[in-house]
Amino acid sequence: MIENSLSPAAITDNLETSFIGRKIIYYPSLPSTNDVAKLKAREGAPEGSVVLAEEQTAGRGRIKRTWLSPRGSIALSIILRPGPDELSSLIMVASLATVHCIEKVSGLKAQIKWPNDVLINDKKVCGILIESDVKGSSVDYAVIGIGINVNLKLSSFPEITPTATSLSHELGRDVSRLDIIRCLLVETERLYLALPSGDSVYQEWRDRLVTLGKKVQVSSGESTYHGIAESVASDGSLLLRQPDGGLTKIVAGDVTLRQ
Ligand code: BTN
């Protein structure tokens, strides 16, 4: 049966994690789970605490964009306290955890567009916003904010239909948000704990990027670049082969695939 509202007790019941999701801070409605998570992190919330909302009224996206999260979607933020070497890998952890869980729970095939948009049939189904507080060489906290369009009737949101989709739209039936959230907590913890022991997370993320090998336009700050998305570095940067043959490393930006 598909749940109408989320219950923190149902999420934590027999959850197979050691720290992520042990503490769930639940709101029926709030402006942004990332904003509350950052506040809780500054107040000393333990690593793995999760802020979860049925709906956000002022959800935030990357590059100062807004993010729509009405009831039926997933909006959650996970508080982590990574080492400085792990910070840049959180985009890989979060996007891989999301594709694994969408595929496991819905059976749909998901793709990652650099750096961490999750797509189904070339339309965006999930956005990820990672924010952190770094003091000198140490990370005070990082927050992984994940928004997934789960049971969203697209006809009610015409402003996003050209570029976005939802799991229910793709499947023709509703999907359990509870199953996706429980899976996300387990997968995020598994991938996060795998970071210190090698390159497996980076390698899988790189291999799953639909962006690589494609002709792209990249907006990064005030600059726009064109070229072929050749590869990604282990710190998550995009390596763009430009028409003059030069290779440019782009740390953050927004990619549009070109014909
Ligand atoms: C993007 O694609 O631009 C990122 C969207 C991130 C949305 C999530 S929803 C949970 C968390 N809270 C926010 O305000 N934003 C993130």
Image (cartoon, rainbow, N blue to C red):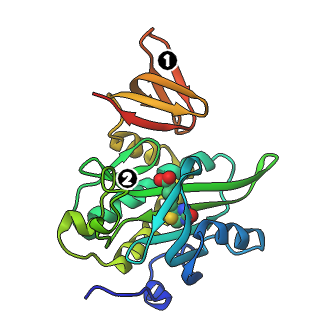
Indicate which disc residue 61 carries: none
Q: Is residue 155 above or below residue 217?
A: below
- Residue to which mark 1 is pinned: 247
Q: Position of residue 253 (x, y in %)?
A: 53, 37
Secondary element type, mark 2: strand
In the rendered view, does 138 fall on the left or right side of 211?
Answer: right
Secondary element type, mark 1: strand
Residue at 21%, 62% in the rendered image: 170
Q: For mark 1, does the 10 Å Cα neighbourhood hold few (<14), some (14 to 19), or many (20 or more) residues? A: some
Q: Is residue 70 above or below residue 95?
A: below
Residue at 66%, 72% in the rendered image: 36
In this view, the residue farthest toward the right is 136
Indicate which disc residue 118 carries: 2
Q: Earlier in the sequence, mark 1 or mark 2?
A: 2
Q: Position of residue 189 (x, y in %)?
A: 50, 65
Q: Quadrant of the N terminus?
A: bottom left
Q: Is residue 53 above or below residue 157?
A: below
Q: CA distance from mark 1 to mark 2?
A: 26 Å
**Quarter where residue 214 is shown:** top left
Which dot, 1 or 2, sits closer to the camera?
A: 2
Front residue of 143/80: it is 143
Instruction: Indicate the amino acid at tag 2.
Output: Val
Instruction: Indicate the amino acid at tag 1.
Output: Leu
Q: For mark 2, does the 10 Å Cα neighbourhood hold few (<14), some (14 to 19), or many (20 or more) residues? A: many
Query: Is residue 41 something one can see in this rendering?
Result: yes
